[in-house]
Amino acid sequence: MERYSHITNKVKREIVLLKARPCIWSKCTFCDYIEDNSTCTKEMIEINNQVLDLITGEYGILEVIDSASIFELPKESLLKIKEVIKKKHIHTLFIESHWIYHKHIQEIRDFFGIKTIVKIGVETFDDHFRNDYLNKNATFQSIEELKKYFDSPCLMVGIKGQTKDMITKDMEILTKCFEYGTISVYRNNSTSVKRDDELVHWFMQEYDYLIDDERYDFLYDPTDFGVGE
């Protein structure tokens, strides 16, 4: 399992994959990203300390991810991140959270005390597909409400049931409303949600220019950030 890497093709930053408790929601129909979760606090702290000690601060920007939300990390790991931020002169932090925690986002921003870009797994701005089919439980009522709390939506393309029109609207909202974002191409896993290869092919032809857009990270494979397995 790779837990430390560099992202150099967009916003240059160090990235760490930490170990966290199980996702508080854990009901998304497409997600089987649970093997890295733990209920052993000692194990999480030990692994996370080893990874966080690798941070050099060379870019001044750090991204911290885990298999759940930033809020699922042990308190000791959150304090360690804060310590590393100060010691390594980090000025910008990327983190991720589920919508469930939206009323606590300002608290975590205040805790770290630096510019914090908060990601959220939106998957699609189509409310029906997002919540009724993917079961995201991301129940914001408007883009304005989403932007009150989050800076960077993570969108997924290539899922059977999505349409070209749906993806077109997603990319339009992303590029018009957000300075940061992540676009992920769906990959089959152990769930019943399947990839639409024809839709992926269309997307890669129609929106290939977004691969080079400095504002948005593009993941054709989940390990393209250099962490995971």
Image: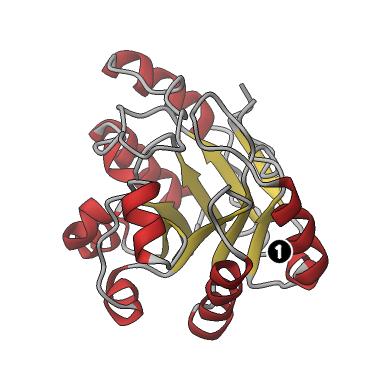
Residue extending farthest bottom: 176
Which quadrant of the view contains residue 214? Answer: bottom right
Residue shown at 63% from the left, 67% from the top: 164
In the figure, is residue 133 to the left or right of 214?
left
Residue 151 in the image: above or below residue 177: above
Give residue 181's position: percent from left, percent from top: 55, 66
Q: Horizontal and vertical percent for residue 45?
A: 35, 23
Residue 24 shown left or right of residue 89 in the figure = left
Residue 224, image quadrant: top right
Q: Is residue 50 above or below residue 16?
A: above
In percent of width and height, residue 154 lies at: 50, 58
**Label 1 amino acid?**
Lys
SS for tag 1? loop
* Residue 27 in which image quadrant: top left
Q: Residue at x 28, y 56 (%)?
A: 99
On screen, residue 217 above or below 87 = below
Instruction: Classify the position of the C terminus by image quarter.
Output: top right
Answer left or right for 96 relative to 111. right
Question: Dot 1, how many residues are within 10 Å of its Cα: few (below 14), some (14-19), or many (20+)?
Answer: some
**Front-most of residues 15 and 88:** 15
The answer to which of 196 and 227 lies nearer the viewer is 196
The total of numbered circles placed on residues is: 1
Rendered image coloring scheme: secondary structure
- Decide: is 152 above or below 65: below
- From the viewer's side, name the closer residue of 96 and 177: 177
| The N terminus: image quadrant | top right
Q: Which residue is mark 1?
A: 10
**Which residue is located at x 70 percent, y 56 percent?**
199
Farthest left residue in view = 103
How far from the left and from the top, in percent, is residue 139?
25, 61
